[in-house]
Image: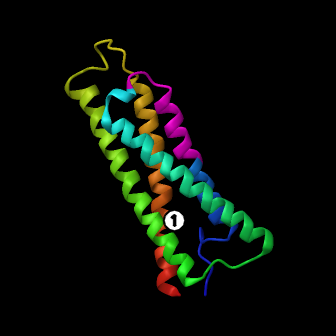
Amino acid sequence: MKSLVGSPGTFSGLLLRLGQCLFAAASIGVMVSSTGFSNYTAFCYLIASMGLQVLWSMGLACLDVYALRIKRDLHNPVLVSLFVVGDWVTATLSLAAACSSAGVTVLFAKDVHFCSRGLELSCGRYQISISCAFVTWALIAKSSLVMFWLLASL
């Protein structure tokens, strides 16, 4: 079987998981540092979703480091099935959170013009946080597809 870029137990898989973790943490950090985010459910959902993503990605990154250190293959059907389900669940939650937060931010900036009225909203930080969340989702989508392809080939 061919080794796929981003498969578990490889250096590329480790980099993919670290990228997911770093962008999710950046999304949380930027959103938490902005003012007034806790008043809006979509932003709180984004933080919860990205927090789950940080935990999931960090756990799998540690597993990748362990597998690389002891040179163990992680292409076990049961283990890959767990990765597929976890990746698809976190991918769905992350996309939903990023899209709902983006919708609220577009509403604030374009429709009701809260950002231009001088209200104490950090619209720029909201946009940066949501951009990091979308990058996180793109990395999760890549990981999800690799895991699904790997499961189909086992």
Q: In which quarter of the image is residue 65?
A: bottom right
Q: Mostly what secondary structure, the magenta segment? A: helix
Which residue was labeled with disc 1? 143
- Residue at figure coordinates x 45%, y 61% from the top left: 141
Residue projecting furthest to the left: 111
The percent coordinates of residue 119 (x first, y second) are 32, 14
The percent coordinates of residue 66 (x first, y second) are 74, 66
The percent coordinates of residue 121 (x first, y second) are 36, 20
> Residue 114: within the magenta?
no
Q: Is 134 displayed left or right of 26 in the figure?
A: left
Q: What colour scheme governs how the chains and residues are painted in the rendered image of this protein?
A: rainbow
- Residue at figure coordinates x 38%, y 29% from the top left: 38
Residue 70 vertical position relative to residue 41 in the rendered view, above or below = below
The percent coordinates of residue 81 (x first, y second) are 49, 77
Residue 90 vertical position relative to residue 45 in the rendered view, above or below = below
User: Which quadrant would the N terminus be assigned to in this image?
Assistant: bottom right
- Residue at figure coordinates x 43%, y 44% from the top left: 48
Q: Is 109 displayed left or right of 3 in the figure?
A: left
Range of residues picked out in magenta: 22-36
Residue 151 vertical position relative to residue 7 in the rendered view, above or below = below
Q: Is 63 displayed left or right of 150 in the figure?
A: right
- Residue at figure coordinates x 31%, y 20% from the top left: 115
Q: Is residue 79 visible?
A: yes
Q: Is residue 20 visible?
A: no
